[in-house]
Image (cartoon, grey):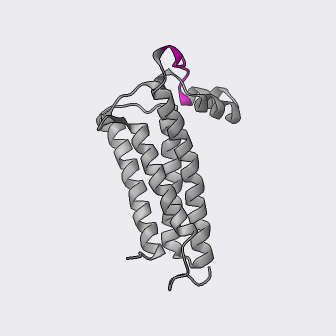
Amino acid sequence: MLFSSRTVFVLGFLFCLSMLLVAGYFQFIEHLEPCPLCILQRVSILVIGIIFLLAALHGPKMIGTRIYGSLIALFSLVGGSISAWHVRLQNLPEDQVPSCGPGLNFMLDNFPLSEAISMVLRGSGECAEVLWTFMGLSIPFWTLVAFVVLLIVGFTQLFKKDNSDLTWI
């Protein structure tokens, strides 16, 4: 059974919202402070969620659905790349883990944006720390899985066959 594009976009938005709520639970209830890479992953999920919401409200036709699908796929690739890098950092041998760096707020306040982003993307010792696992997998790994799911959803909308709800914009 195929879902309409609007249904897919609503479900995608709810999925992203639930991910952000879980992240908030970990931060504010479980007191697990997010590292800079975690924050970038959250921003990626937020952007994808906003795209899903805009698409659901818009209810686009063929071209619009493909545009939203491509944006979802693009930001899923970005977020997934950050998650994959984070997982890599968490699996480095202890002697190869980078030293802890300054916090994200300090970097944004004291360095140009491009340099601060570069520093965040290199990662630090705090990003290599595994604070929580489920089924033996860390939060960044589960986030990577979520980005793969979102990428697949984006591609399904990008390459959706002509349907009754697909005519023009």
Q: Give the magenta part as a residue range.
A: 95-104
Of 12 and 133, the residue lying toward us = 133
**Residue 68 location (% of width, % of height):** 58, 66
**Residue 117 location (% of width, % of height):** 63, 34
The residue drawn where x is 58% and y is 47% is: 78
The residue drawn where x is 51% and y is 76% is: 59
**Residue 127 location (% of width, % of height):** 48, 27
How many marks the image carries: the answer is: 0
**Residue 14 location (% of width, % of height):** 39, 60
Which quarter of the rendering shows the C terminus? Answer: bottom right
Left or right position of 118 against 8: right
Which quarter of the rendering shows the N terminus? Answer: bottom left
Q: Residue furthest top?
A: 95
Instruction: Write down the quadrant of residue 29 in the picture.
Output: top left
Left or right position of 25 against 38: left
The residue drawn where x is 50% and y is 28% is: 89
- Is residue 99 a member of the stretch shown in magenta? yes
The residue drawn where x is 48% and y is 74% is: 5
Q: Is residue 14 above or below residue 86?
A: below
- Is residue 98 a member of the stretch shown in magenta? yes
Q: Is residue 89 above or below residue 21?
A: above
Of 96 and 112, the residue lying toward us = 96
Q: Is residue 14 above or below residue 131?
A: below
Q: Is residue 69 above or below residue 6?
A: above
Instruction: Write down the quadrant of residue 72 in the picture.
Output: bottom right
Q: Main secondary structure of the magenta part?
A: loop
